[in-house]
């Protein structure tokens, strides 16, 4: 079986963007691929340690394992593991940083944005090198496919370039990972500002639906989401003229798997308010099911510990084999 790798940072609270962008696909990906689901706490450390020195990573890790399970990850089929518990990631990171140029990291738009947010002050090395650690995460497992949202595409292309560059010198050590981006839902936008991405770290909470939000609050946020003052008031997918409605259609389509075309037809003569009510019903139904199983799994800490221990063993074993091959090839 081919390998699929993906991950989420255990930072903040998980959003409908995370779900529509990648998580809602995970159940099906397991049918086709052998899957690794990483909990990227080393990545999260970079942003979190600045925000809070008392951050309890372990609580957040358990939250995320429970969420992975409630979104359909099957621990009997797939590997769920915590990045910090598998030391090979940091080791390969150093090797790969020798094959990554300053200029290409400097061009990463996510870096540029975060740099701006920090007012260009105290930009640490980890923020800058973040995509190199991502390359290590992925390349360690001979990954064939990586499931991500659109915002990560540029990082993934860099990962591919690093692998190519390495292979040119050391002959086909790395598998070049292919990028899996959903055609719909890969970039869910902020509800009040539909020109920017829905994000965990948004200061305006009306912009974001959190998977653990109270169901009534989710309804309210959807109902109050920004649409447009287009006189025809039609439900049409047009990201330029109608970014708000298009975003709601993307959410609807990701959740129900109905095509945008079919949804446009179904709601052609419907008022925005009725459309939003229908959308709220399907979103709330899906999220409340996720929440039910989330709270069930989250209480069962021993079970969660068993899962990550097993994942650690597997990931360590698998990645160590590959890491040693790489070291050997490099002459160590
Ligand atoms: P932050 O904004 O703090 O970076 P995040 O919501 O982007 O947080 P990550 O852990 O960085 O969360 O991303 C996890 C996965 O979710 C990635 O594959 C990312 O591309 C995807 N993702 C994040 N936001 C969205 C979104 N708005 N729409 C679709 N996919 C998204
Ligand atoms: Mg992100």
Image (tube, rainbow, N blue to C red):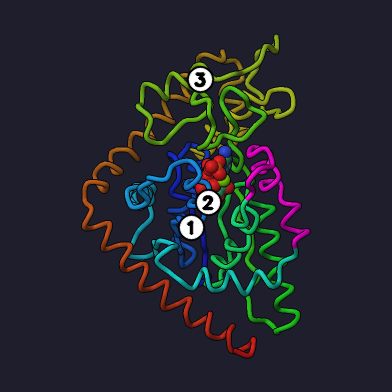
Q: Tell me the tag on residue 161.
A: none
Disc 3 or 2, which lies upstream in sequence?
Answer: 2
Of badges 3 and 2, the one in the foreground is: 2
Q: Which residue is mark 2?
A: 46
Q: CA distance from mark 3 to mark 1?
A: 38 Å
Of badges 3 and 1, the one in the foreground is: 1
Boundaries of the magenta span: 102-123
Q: Determine which quarter of the picture holds residue 79.
A: bottom left
Disc 3 or 1, which lies upstream in sequence?
Answer: 1
Q: Which residue is mark 3?
A: 276
* Residue farthest front in this picture: 122
Q: For residue 233: magenta? A: no
- What crowding class fits label 2: few (fewer than 14 Cα within 10 Å), some (14-19), or many (20 or more)? some
Q: CA distance from mark 3 to mark 2?
A: 37 Å
> How far from the left and from the top, in percent, is residue 306?
26, 63
Label 1: element kind: helix
Q: At x 23% / y 53%, what residue is drawn?
A: 301
Name the dominant secondary structure of the magenta segment. helix
Q: Tell me the tag on residue 42.
A: 1
Relative to 304, is 114 on the left or the right?
right
Relative to 308, is 35 on the left or the right?
right
Above or below residue 89? Residue 219 is: above
Can you see residue 46?
yes
Disc 3 beta carbon < 8 A from ligand 1? no
> How far from the left and from the top, in percent, is residue 156?
65, 58
Above or below residue 142? Residue 294 is: above
């Amino acid at each position: 079986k081919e390998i699929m790798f993906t991950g989420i940072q255990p930072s903040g609270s998980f959003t409908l963007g995370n779900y529509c962008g990648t998580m809602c696909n995970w159940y099906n990906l397991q049918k086709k691929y052998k899957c690794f689901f990483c909990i990227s706490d080393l990545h999260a450390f970079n942003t979190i340690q600045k925000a809070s020195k008392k951050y309890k990573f372990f609580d957040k890790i358990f939250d995320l394992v429970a969420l992975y399970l409630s979104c359909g990850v099957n621990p009997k089929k797939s590997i769920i593991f915590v990045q910090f518990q598998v030391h090979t990631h940091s080791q390969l990171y150093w090797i790969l940083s020798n094959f990554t140029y300053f200029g290409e990291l400097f061009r990463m738009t996510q870096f540029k944005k975060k740099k701006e947010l920090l007012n260009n002050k105290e930009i640490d090395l980890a923020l800058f090198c973040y995509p190199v650690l991502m390359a290590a995460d992925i390349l360690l497992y001979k990954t064939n496919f990586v499931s991500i949202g659109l915002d990560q595409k540029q990082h993934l292309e860099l990962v591919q370039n690093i692998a190519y560059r390495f292979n040119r010198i050391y002959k086909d050590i790395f598998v070049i990972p292919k990028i899996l981006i959903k055609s719909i839902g890969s970039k869910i936008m902020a509800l009040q500002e539909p020109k920017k991405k829905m994000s965990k770290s948004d200061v305006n909470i009306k912009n974001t639906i959190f998977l653990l939000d109270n169901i009534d609050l989710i309804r309210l946020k959807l109902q109050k989401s920004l649409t447009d003052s287009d006189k025809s008031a039609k439900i049409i997918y047009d990201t330029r003229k109608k970014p708000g409605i298009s975003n709601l259609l993307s959410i609807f389509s990701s959740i129900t798997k109905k095509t945008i075309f079919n949804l446009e037809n179904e709601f052609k003569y419907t008022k925005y308010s009725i459309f939003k009510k229908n959308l709220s019903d399907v979103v709330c139904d899906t999220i409340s099911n996720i929440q039910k199983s989330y709270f069930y799994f989250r209480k069962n800490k021993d079970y969660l510990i068993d899962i990550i221990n097993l994942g650690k063993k597997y990931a360590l074993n698998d990645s160590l084999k590959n890491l040693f091959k790489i070291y050997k090839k490099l002459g160590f």
